[in-house]
Amino acid sequence: MVTEKERNMHKLAHLLESNAKWSQQVSETDPGFFSRLADQQAPDYLWIGCADSRVPANQIVGVDPGELFVHRNVANIVVHSDLNCMAVVQFAVEVLKVKHIIVCGHYNCGGVAAVMNNRELGLIDNWLNHIHDIRYQHLDRLEAIVDPQARCDRLCELNVITQVANVCRTTIVRDAWQRGQDLAVHGWIYGLYDGRLRDLGMCVLNTKEMEAAYVAAIKSTEGGDRVLPHVT
Ligand code: CO
């Protein structure tokens, strides 16, 4: 039998109180904020990021609610048969008409590290097999890196670049470009150590550019034991 006291302890009162304070603060600063947003959303950006609690999309780019349309999953993977992700991309591109899709990975990604270290975590291993595919595709490039942390971070970068290519290859994005819709796809990576985003140099504006952009971005990740800014 659960007592009332025990139940109250599980009611997450601190989160609800914190929400009430936040809502009040926002309303005081900008009295029309919530009523404006309630009417409609018109974000310019679709953010596809990792579910990691340390990489909150809006907060790290410093934008308010209403400015980012967000899809997050473990290790920011874009799979063409994932109805959830495809529905988000379709709605963002065709209905909201976002101008940018940002695939944002992060260094020290637990999902990527699990793959690198062959850790077994259960059902999620099936999802992370998509990262295994990328690892095997670039095995030589990765094995050439001696430092395990740098090797893992490189796989984080290769994953982002691959997912940008996956976004570009969806029928949704290809159709948008064919219609002449203004849409750019970007690959970024976030450093947990310094809170900084880095552009991986893959910004694709049309189908024709995609392949060359992918090859150039993959090449730019090379450099043996290149020391990443945060690994000191
Ligand atoms: Co992650």
Image: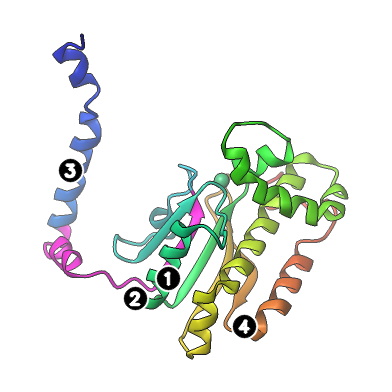
- Gap in angstroms between the C-alphas marked 3 and 1: 35 Å
Residue beneath label 3, please?
A: 21
Q: Which residue is drawn at the image coordinates 72% and 54% (left, top)?
A: 134
The x, y position of residue 118, in whole percent, is: 73, 35
Q: Which mark is residue 207?
A: 4
User: Can you say which quadrant of the picture contains the N terminus?
Assistant: top left
Tell whether 148 sits left or right of 88: right
Q: How is the image coloured?
A: rainbow
Q: What label sits on residue 90 in the rendered view?
A: 1
Magenta-span inclusion, residue 22: no
Name the residue beneath numbered marker 2: 95
In front of the other: 193 or 186: 186
Residue appearing at x 66%, y 62% in the figure = 162
| Residue 128 horizontal side relative to residue 173, left or right | right
Q: Nearer the viewer, mark 3 or mark 2?
A: 2
Say what amino acid the circle numbered 4 marks.
Answer: Thr
Residue 68: percent from left, percent from top: 37, 64
